[in-house]
Amino acid sequence: MPGSSGNAAVTRSTLRQQIADALRDEVLAGRLQPGQEFTVKEIAEQYGVSATPVREALVDLSAQGLLEADQHRGFRVHEYSVDDYRGIIEARSLIIDGMFQALDDSRKGYREPGDPRTAAALAGVRRRGEEAQRAASAGDLTVLIGYDLRFWRELAALFGNPYLADFLHRLRVQSWVCAVQPLRRLADLRGELWSGHTELVDALSRRDIAAARSIIDAYHTHSLSLIERLAT
């Protein structure tokens, strides 16, 4: 039947993404522990689907650095070290700084803060930031991670380079995967989690790059210090 193979491919692609998203959330929630092993068959049975989209999803997560493939044992959750976290923070800093540079160079595709489209987008990003801050203040790590990832994805989209935005998103997922295990060992996370999201949006709205960089530097210093302390 014409189009049937295309529909099957779309369905498999959708399943692949749904499974990848679900497993990523399991890792971020701490339900899949670093070093934990599983097979394609186990995941397929867990979700009640065929092996093909599961295998593709696991390969995708391996390419993103969240899983490791073992030819004989299946897959395992990647174990990050404090040194890994330092490297991720450094890479994240370089990407964010490159995005900030776009504010001083219209050729990079960043729309002016006065542009109604930019103002509306920034308002949406700020709302994500407010939700992230509330979660951080309450010490709700799961809710914070969800809003934080959306905040940075939407903020990065304003700078006009989808490749940088995708790379930053990948780095942010990796940094959360790295941080989530030590953070969940704390009984009370209130006062421990960074909550400068709206402050950053306001600085960018003013086109105050120096203030934005200062906020990011303080954020990365805080995050790295916290993870180093928990690791020891």
Image (cartoon, rainbow, N blue to C red):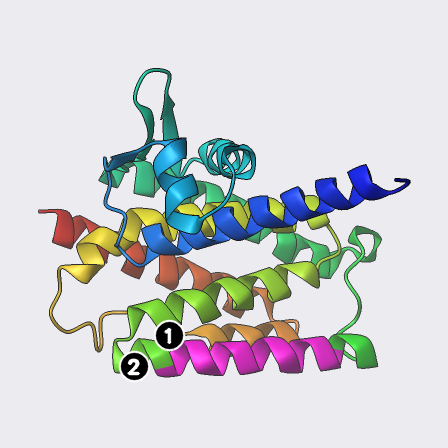
Q: What amino acid does circle 1 point to?
A: Ser
Give the extent of the magenta segment.
119-134
Q: Residue furthest left?
A: 232
Residue displayed at 76% across by 75% down: 118
Dot label at residue 29: none
Question: How many C-alpha atoms fall within 10 Å of the one at disc 2: few (<14), some, or many (≥20)?
Answer: some
Q: CA distance from mark 1 to mark 2?
A: 7 Å
Residue displayed at 40% across by 56% down: 25
Residue 194, can we see it? Answer: no
Residue 183: x, y in percent? 21, 59
The reply to whether the magenta stretch includes residue 86 is no
Residue 156 sits above or below residue 174 on the image: below
Residue 153: x, y in percent? 59, 60
- Side of 22 where 194 appears, left or right: left
Q: Residue furthest front?
A: 1
* Location of mark 2 (residue): 137
- Asked whether disc 1 touches disc 2, contact meaning CB atoms under 8 Å apart, the reply is yes
Q: Residue furthest top?
A: 72
Identify the secondary structure beneath mark 1. loop
Name which quarter of the figure residue 44 lies in: top left
Residue 106, can we see it? Answer: yes
Question: Who is closer to the viewer here, 231 or 55?
Answer: 55
- Side of 146 where 86 appears, left or right: left
Label 1 or label 2, whichever lies nearer to me, is 2
Identify the secondary structure beneath mark 2. helix
* Location of mark 1 (residue): 195
Question: How many C-alpha atoms fall within 10 Å of the one at disc 1: few (<14), some, or many (≥20)?
Answer: many
Residue 54: x, y in percent? 49, 38
For the N terminus, the quadrant is top right
Of mark 1 and mark 2, the one earlier in the sequence is 2
